Image (spheres, grey):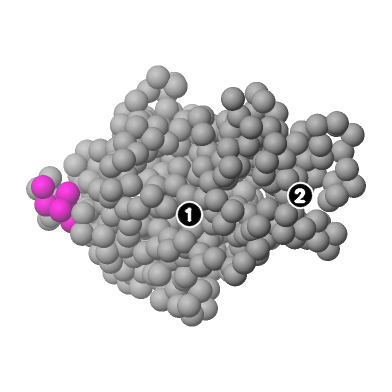
């Protein structure tokens, strides 16, 4: 039986303050003590004691160092560092754990984390003293991004560093998580029983049909990843594809896959910034999961560059995640920019569409795939958890923890509508008029 006295009740009070569900020391009417019923999880401390609702998902603080990190960085950053370092563990259903945490207090509010008040900080400090958690600020886990050392935001050098941080973590690790398709964007599911591979193939084919690809056409794939779309467009539609990425590891594997498919005459994979592509025109352009790396300030340049690379009448499909929770500011000290997508920015669908129209494109179609991405992410989490030991061997335990947290939390974000993902199909003026059709994209 779990101990009900010890560090856990005091630790629960500290966690309640950080989450924004506590009272910063004014007491709680529940006779079981302040803080114990104010947290949405069952909490186990390093001494084996427990506190919080008995039927709630369980998280464990395995070391006082976790609380010390929170004292130095009270909020999402401190909790994230402790989780990545293995000083906090989530037990059981990872989705249930993060659903409970994300629905509580400050974590339920969109936008940057609300700083603690002086009174909350003082109460947190006193709790740290009582639990013997005071000490120097622990070094961040080695998996934390350091791209800010590479110059101004969205410069070529800094963008390359940001892309390398996320994508150059091992092709075998990504194959384990993504499956054989090696497609790292939202799949399209006919129903929940559709397998991941079939859903990804359906997505690639849908984009080819929306772009109206025909044999011999020249196609640019911006942010080509491991070459899956380029291979599909060349093999199934006879297109000649140029794929560009800033990840050297992606490019190496993509070229190997192209060679194995016997498509080197039709597919050219480059390590190149999209801003440096100068060998247009192209008949069509695909951009899947790439514009999130562009940033709000660079959006006009992104649109202008792709518009200039298209022939008159050519189509662009922009497939990107959107922020659906209203105006927000970037929080550089939150989990995603620190550990997952440095310098990444989610824009609203309206911002993206306006940017494309301002850049001279005509919008042909907008399709929302939010529910599809939730299913995709849950499939990726299953792949990771089913092969956890191998994932740790291929990278590090910290990296595997990062991907588990980010994918599970992202799935919940798509399920509750905080985030969305949309395919926006646009056309450059001139050339043939778009065909009249209902949205079946046949032929």
Quadrant where the C terminus lies? top left
| Rendering coords of residue 56 (x, y %) | 64, 28
Classify residue 30 as left or right of residue 112.
right
- Near mark 2 (Cα within 10 A), the count class, few <14, some 14-19 or many ≥20, is many
What residue sits 51% from the left and 34% below the top? 91
Which residue corresponds to the image point at 26% horizontal and 60% vertical from the top-left?
Answer: 249
Q: Residue at x 42, y 36 (%)?
A: 381
* Residue 368 rendering spot, x and y as whole percentages: 54, 37
User: In the picture, residue 275 is in which quadrant?
Assistant: bottom left
Asked whether the viewer can see residue 129, the reply is yes
Question: Up-down: is 390 above or below 308?
Answer: above
Residue 412: x and y in percent read 57, 36
Mark 1 lies on residue: 85
Q: Is residue 83 above or below residue 277?
A: above
- Main SS of residues in magenta: helix
Residue displayed at 64% across by 32% down? 3
Q: Which residue is mark 2?
A: 17
| Label 1 or label 2, whichever comes before in sequence order | 2
Label 1: few (<14), some (14–19) or many (≥20) C-alpha neighbours in 10 Å: many
Quadrant in which residue 68 is drawn: bottom right
**What secondary structure is found at the residue carrying circle 2?**
helix
Residue 256 forms part of the magenta stretch: yes
Q: Quadrant of residue 212?
A: top left
Where does the magenta region start and end? 255-260
Q: Magenta stretch: residue 262 in it? A: no
């Amino acid at each position: 039986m779990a101990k009900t006295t010890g560090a856990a009740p005091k630790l629960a009070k500290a966690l309640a303050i950080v989450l924004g569900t506590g009272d910063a020391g004014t007491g709680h009417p529940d006779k079981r003590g302040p803080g114990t019923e104010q947290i949405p999880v069952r909490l186990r401390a390093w001494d084996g004691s427990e506190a919080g609702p008995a039927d709630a998902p369980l998280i464990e603080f395995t070391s006082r160092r976790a609380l010390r990190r929170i004292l130095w960085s009270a909020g999402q950053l401190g909790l994230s560092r402790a989780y990545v370092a293995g000083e906090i563990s989530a037990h059981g259903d990872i989705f249930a754990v993060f659903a409970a945490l994300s629905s509580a207090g400050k974590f339920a509010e969109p936008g940057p984390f609300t700083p603690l008040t002086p009174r909350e900080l003082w109460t947190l400090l006193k709790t740290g003293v009582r639990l013997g958690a005071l000490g120097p600020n622990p070094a961040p886990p080695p998996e934390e991004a350091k791209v800010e050392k590479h110059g101004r935001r969205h410069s070529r050098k800094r963008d390359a560093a940001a892309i390398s941080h996320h994508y150059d973590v091992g092709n075998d690790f990504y194959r384990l998580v993504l499956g054989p398709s090696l497609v790292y964007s939202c799949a399209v599911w006919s129903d929940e029983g559709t397998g991941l591979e079939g859903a990804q193939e359906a997505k690639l084919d849908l984009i080819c049909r929306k772009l109206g690809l025909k044999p011999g056409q020249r196609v640019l794939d911006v942010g080509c990843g491991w070459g899956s779309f380029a291979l599909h467009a060349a093999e199934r539609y006879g297109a000649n594809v140029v794929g560009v990425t800033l990840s050297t590891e992606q490019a190496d594997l993509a070229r190997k896959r192209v060679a194995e498919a016997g498509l080197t005459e039709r597919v050219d994979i480059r390590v190149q910034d999209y801003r440096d592509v100068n060998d247009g025109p192209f008949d069509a352009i695909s951009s899947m999961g790439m514009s999130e790396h562009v940033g709000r300030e660079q959006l006009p340049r992104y649109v202008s560059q792709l518009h200039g690379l298209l022939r008159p009448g050519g189509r662009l499909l922009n497939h990107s995640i959107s922020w659906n929770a209203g105006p927000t500011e970037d929080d550089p000290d939150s989990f995603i920019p620190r550990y997952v997508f440095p310098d990444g920015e989610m824009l609203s669908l309206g911002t993206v569409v306006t940017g494309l129209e301002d850049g001279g494109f005509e919008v042909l179609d907008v399709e929302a795939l939010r529910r599809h991405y939730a299913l995709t992410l849950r499939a990726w989490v299953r792949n990771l958890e089913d092969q956890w030991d191998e994932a740790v061997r291929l990278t590090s335990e910290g990296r595997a923890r990062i991907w588990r947290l980010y994918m599970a939390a992202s799935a919940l974000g798509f399920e509750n509508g905080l985030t969305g993902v949309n395919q926006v199909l646009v056309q450059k003026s001139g050339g043939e008029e778009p065909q009249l059709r209902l949205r079946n994209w046949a032929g």
